[in-house]
Amino acid sequence: MMIDKSSAKPYYEQIVLLIKEQVLQGILQPGEQIASVREMARQLLMNPNTVSKAYKMLEMQGVIVTVKGRGTYIAEQQTTVRDDAKVAQVKQKIQELVLEARYLSVDETEITKWVTEQYEGSQTNAND
Amino acid sequence: MMIDKSSAKPYYEQIVLLIKEQVLQGILQPGEQIASVREMARQLLMNPNTVSKAYKMLEMQGVIVTVKGRGTYIAEQQTTVRDDAKVAQVKQKIQELVLEARYLSVDETEITKWVTEQYEGSQTNAND
Amino acid sequence: MMIDKSSAKPYYEQIVLLIKEQVLQGILQPGEQIASVREMARQLLMNPNTVSKAYKMLEMQGVIVTVKGRGTYIAEQQTTVRDDAKVAQVKQKIQELVLEARYLSVDETEITKWVTEQYEGSQTNAND
Amino acid sequence: MMIDKSSAKPYYEQIVLLIKEQVLQGILQPGEQIASVREMARQLLMNPNTVSKAYKMLEMQGVIVTVKGRGTYIAEQQTTVRDDAKVAQVKQKIQELVLEARYLSVDETEITKWVTEQYEGSQTNAND
DNA sequence: GTGGTCTAGACCACT
DNA sequence: GTGGTCTAGACCACA
């Protein structure tokens, strides 16, 4: 549960990534309840509006489900529908970053290694 | 020479990517003169200041060299210094996108394919 | 915090130098927040865009880190990569100025003294 | 006699430096006649206006002297008056570059070496 | 003609 | 409140 206050990445995006990563790693289990917006805001020392925004995005992406009056839970089933439009967007972004990497003299095998790393376990990353 | 005006990506960043891609693909050759700021602005139907901003970024990255009163040229030599801090940033960003891809049910081999594509020819993609 | 409005040096470059010098002198500490773009613009009696341009350059050089909605901070760690191409450029420029100095009957020891001065404390100079 | 067409430095400045360096190195001797504006322009493949501008600057700095109808000569005596205002300017510029160098992890001894190099012989420099 | 700097002011995203 | 992007238009320096 670490938010990098000195990162250029918006807080709400950091929260989204945090939750998603913990789900993929199995730290957060489907059905499990997570902290309420206000509780999470207290824990992370940030504005509830920011946490709320993050939760909304996670809900839109089908990662969590909020039940009015009961709380917020990790979604039972991951949506297995493949949204081709979104996939195309991600592909686009990745390829742009690969372009950046090429300009930084990074070769193909190294990038492939990064991808594999992310698919295996998952290690915490510094930086932004 | 296509700029997506409806993309969330700033115009100037799109121009930067465009030029960089064309250089890596060999469409633009070292020493070659590229369109002037005003000419490019005319072609892309945008403000010269925006194009100028893109050119400035490209110059700082060593992709082009610009000379007052003479014009703008593709840099003769690419600086091949590997800036580890920047590499770490790109790695970080790529891994975050890989995380997103996993949520969209994209498997590792497909992403690897995207990377390879970018290293071989390079085809243009829509979206942002 | 002095900007020479009659200098040939662009405002934004003067700001860049100002901040860099204060960082090297320890007046500005890593992690410390600096004046917002608008605030700095008010203080220096100039357009916020100009200050913004300076901040952008400082960010690209890794001196500061700027976060949308939160503010601008002195970077925690300086990137210590030595970019030989940039070093060569600076060397080139310095040697040209040394040439000029020789024509002004300045001897080698005096220039060496200037260099040392800059490495020790650092005192502000007028002119451009 | 080399002008770097791909340098960001204005042509006229390059000419000025060229002449000054050759004088300091003794390649051009006091009293020696140099090529006329038009002749020099032909040799360097550039606009006579550009060469003319360079010669005017050299004359202002007392490096050359132009005699109407007779031609242009290397000045007999170097002005030994030390112009403190100009010296202050050069000092200022050098110290700014030293600041840049420090940010590029260059230490004091290396810069001092550059200065010494320029005072001894004088070698041609690539880059800009 | 080229690029560079600066201002003024609009609109957007994040906290 | 913060910074970011974009436009419009003025003025300057270089070729």
Image (cartoon, coloured by chain):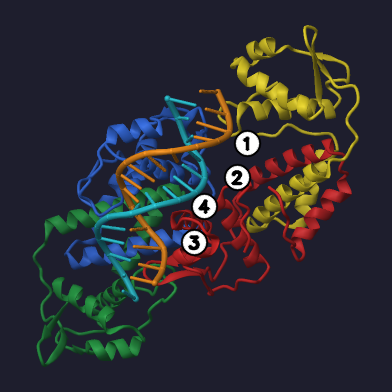
Chain colours: A green, B blue, C red, D yellow, E cyan, F orange
Which residue is denoted by mark 3 in the rendering? Answer: C41
Residues packed near mark 4 inside 10 Å, few (<14), some (14 to 19) or many (20 plus): some
Q: How many marks?
A: 4
Using the rendered image of the protein, determine whether residue A106 is visible from the camera's viewpoint.
Answer: no
- Indicate which disc residue C85 carries: 2
Which residue is denoted by mark 4 in the rendering? Answer: B82
Which residue is denoted by mark 1 in the rendering? Answer: D127
Q: Secondary structure at mark 2?
A: helix
Q: Between tags 4 and 2, which lies in front?
A: 2
Q: Chain of mark 2?
A: C
Q: Amino acid at mark 1?
A: Asn
Question: Residue C23 at x, y = what percent?
Answer: 62, 67
Residues packed near mark 3 inside 10 Å, few (<14), some (14 to 19) or many (20 plus): some
Q: Secondary structure at mark 1?
A: loop
Q: Chain of mark 3?
A: C
Q: CA distance from mark 3 to mark 2?
A: 33 Å
Q: Amino acid at mark 3?
A: Ala
Q: Secondary structure at mark 4?
A: loop
Same chain for marks 3 and 1?
A: no
Question: Residue A13 at x, y = what percent?
Answer: 29, 71
- Taking D31 as reference, is B37 left or right? left
